[in-house]
Amino acid sequence: MQNKSNSFVGMKKVLLTGISGFIGQHCAVELLKNGYSVKGSLRNLSKVDAITKAIQKEITPNGNLEFCQLDLLKDDGWEQAMKDCDFVMHVASPFISKIPKDENELIKPAVEGTLRVLTAAKKTGIKRVVLTSSMVAMLGDIVGDKNINHNSWTNINAKNATAYLKSKTLAEKRAWKFINDQNDEEKLELVTIHPGPVYGPTLSNNLSGESMTTFKNILLGKIPRMLKARINMSDVRDVAKIHVMALENKSANGKRFIVASERAYAYQELTTTLRYNGYEKVSSKVAPNFMIKLLANFNNEMKGMLPYVGKTYSGDISDTIKTFNWKPIAFEKMVLDTAKSIENVLNG
């Protein structure tokens, strides 16, 4: 194992992939607040200024934020980027709910990228990788499972298993295989984090991501009927917090953690909360299941919703609470903080 130069000056450095994303930016802030130095990876360094400004809204980096150019589909630069790092936080992964023409558009970068990160981490003596997975990697046979926990896996051959579900499941399974196949004494450690749908305040004012686009359209009354579905929902601030706490918590090694609300919430509960708090454009009507299923025959975005139509997926977060002595942000606070953040962006 290589000596890490920064460890001698008392500050540990984390390579953070996906720093330009919604979760990635919050992870960068949380890392800096907890005394870590951050090296964020980007496919395109033209985003550096915008990301830096977003992070500076929450904390002044004081020279502890740097960037490097890396691509999940290319080998170039990964080992070099990790040489002076102690940990890796692998957040980057493609996410679109609609069905792509070729499912490998999602699956290939997710699986190959994860393997590329782990291979470089192993070679450069990284101690632990924290990987962003998802509750969608835990849906069983995709028929509605009330007992999702750290032992649950999505059956990628099940009916309605979308490209996104496959990408997250296959990437995580490949990661655990890599970890379990190690046969030397200095073993790379892995922790996986599993959020549900992720909401919360934006740092960058960028509402183009899947979650923020949906929430924005709900606020503007552009979604007349909500999907009938229940799942644990996640506040991005909680997701970032547990990513950081998982870096050095000894009890976390080798485990999968659901980071979400204590119970599953219906999307109608989200809209009802908004209407009760004065968001009059929001519709609290629910779309009949048959309507979504019918539209899915003609619309790839609706087809992407089929794993959830009329179903409840309830995750057990007790192990996360116990391991990290953590309590999730209240559902109402998450909803209203998200709404306020989007309002601020829309109002300039």
Image: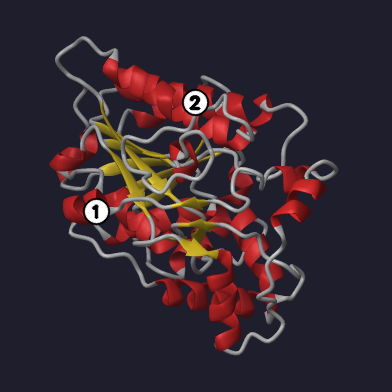
Q: Is residue 290 visible?
A: yes
Where disc 2 sits, the SS reads helix
The C terminus lies in quadrant: bottom right
Q: Mark 1 and 2 residues: CB-CB less than 8 Å, in contact?
A: no
Side of 34 relative to 99 (left or right): left
Please tell me which of labels 1 and 2 falls first in the chain: 2
Of residue 45 and residue 127, the one placed in the foreground of this image is 127
Q: Residues within 10 Å of mark 2 (few under 14, many from 20)?
A: many
Marks 1 and 2, how far apart in space? 25 Å
In the displayed structure, would residue 120 be above or below residue 135?
above
**Residue 108 appears in which quarter of the rendering?**
top right
Q: Amino acid at mark 1?
A: Ser
Q: Residues within 10 Å of mark 1 (few under 14, many from 20)?
A: some
Image x and y of residue 173, in percent: 41, 25
In the displayed structure, would residue 319 be above or below residue 332?
above
- Residue receiving disc 2: 170
Considering every residue shown, the one lying at the far right of the view is 298
Q: Amino acid at mark 2?
A: Leu
Colour pattern = secondary structure
Side of 57 relative to 122 (left or right): right
In the displayed structure, would residue 148 be above or below residue 213?
above
- Nearer the observer: mark 1 or 2; the answer is 1
- Residue receiving disc 1: 318
Q: Residue at x 37, y 72 (%)?
A: 330
Where disc 1 sits, the SS reads helix
Image x and y of residue 252, in percent: 20, 41
Q: Is residue 79 visible?
A: no
Q: Residue at x 63, y 47 (%)?
A: 46
